[in-house]
Amino acid sequence: MSTAEIGVDDYLSFVRREYLAGYIARGGASVKLLCAADEAVRNQLAAGLPEIGDGFAYAEVDAVTTRVHLIDQVFTTVARQLDWTGLAGSVVRAALDQAGFPAPAGIDRIDIGAIARHHDVNAAELYRSVRRAVEQLVLRDTEMSHEFRVAMLRLCQERLGRGDVTAEERETVIGWLHGERLPAADLRRVGLNAKVNRYNARPLLLSLTRWLRIAGRPGLILRLDLHRLAVTRRPPAGLRDGFYYAKAATLDAYELVRQLIDAVDEIEGLFVAVEVPPVLVHDEARGLPAYTALHLRVADEVHDRHRQNPYAALVRIGSHSVEVS
């Protein structure tokens, strides 16, 4: 029996209108499993997703190049695609607004001295006021994990440009976010202890989406490509490309998606597009049915061959649309 599909352009327009522009931008979160009919449709999705979110940050994680069954690897892959310095600068500007001394229009670099002269105030007094405002914005927001708040405070302090945090220490913080191996002494110098790992990565991911909103962005669009999970046997050594997954790792990847689905009430401003090939939708041995906890959450909700429900957790995407419900 054939199953109804939604055209790529129609579905992307639907997501922009019904999710990103309203629900996600107001702080909601959603995880969708998208099953592309063929490689051309998959490529269209990959090209279209970054374009539909006005102001949204965008990141993609491919199971070929990232071990998607490990949440710390997923987080650090996302972190490497974000402009942490720019986000910190946006938060410092928000702190200047909160302190009543907004940065003049047309000034790209945050210069406390220039801003003080613009407002005809003492630079040292302005710095103390803005630093307090930054600390209130960052440290008092308990929606973010303690480690994440410490890291973001250091980045904001470096943007203030008064020497509290050096450029080298800023790079240490960013390297920590990226999952790089760093000397323990360097981490302690910026107030960080544990590296990003499987225990703190999930709170860090939730903190990240909150931080984007504090920085004035509506949220994050995350494309999670799981097509590699369908490869059952690794090719010969000379033909291998990236990571391959045993069944246990495949089930762990499904568990990660299940956790994201169950955490949508805790996450602000996140839209996750999980792309799976058609074979994984029905394969009893290795596909979604092999992991009941996820399969029950995304099982087909509409069984009409001529009608597709774009609000469903699992949506089939084709090159042409049929009628949607």
Image: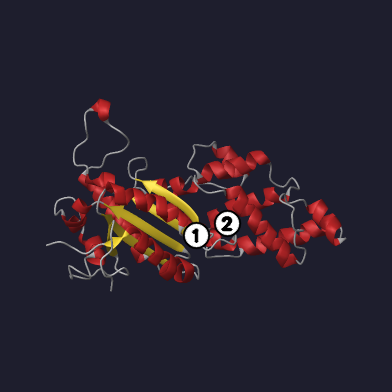
Q: How is the image coloured?
A: secondary structure
For the residue carrying disc 1, how many other residues have a C-alpha within 10 Å: few (<14), some (14-19), or many (20+)?
many
Residue 130: percent from the left, percent from the top?
74, 60
For the residue carrying disc 2, how many other residues have a C-alpha within 10 Å: few (<14), some (14-19), or many (20+)?
many
Frontmost residue, 319 versus 52: 319
- In the figure, is residue 91 to the left or right of 17? right
**Residue at mark 2 to residue at mark 1: CA–CA distance:** 13 Å
| Camera sees residue 266 | no
Question: Residue 149's mark?
Answer: 2
Please report whichever mark, 2 or 1, sits nearer to the chain's N-terminal start: 2
Check the image and name the residue furthest to the top: 238
Query: Which residue, given by chain and number where applicable, does mark 1 sit on?
Result: 209
Q: Indicate the amino acid at tag 1.
A: Thr
Q: Is 184 placed above or below 291 here?
A: above
Residue 38: percent from the left, percent from the top?
25, 50
Q: Quadrant of residue 66?
A: top left
Check the image and name the residue furthest to the bottom: 325
Frontmost residue, 57 versus 166: 57
Residue 172: percent from the left, percent from the top?
58, 41
Q: What residue is drawn where x is 26% and y is 70%?
A: 323
Which mark is in front, 2 or 1?
1
Quarter of the image where the C terminus is located: bottom left
Q: Secondary structure at mark 2?
A: helix
Check the image and name the residue furthest to the left: 1
Q: Indicate the amino acid at tag 2.
A: Arg
How many labels, in total? 2
Residue 116: percent from the left, percent from the top?
83, 57
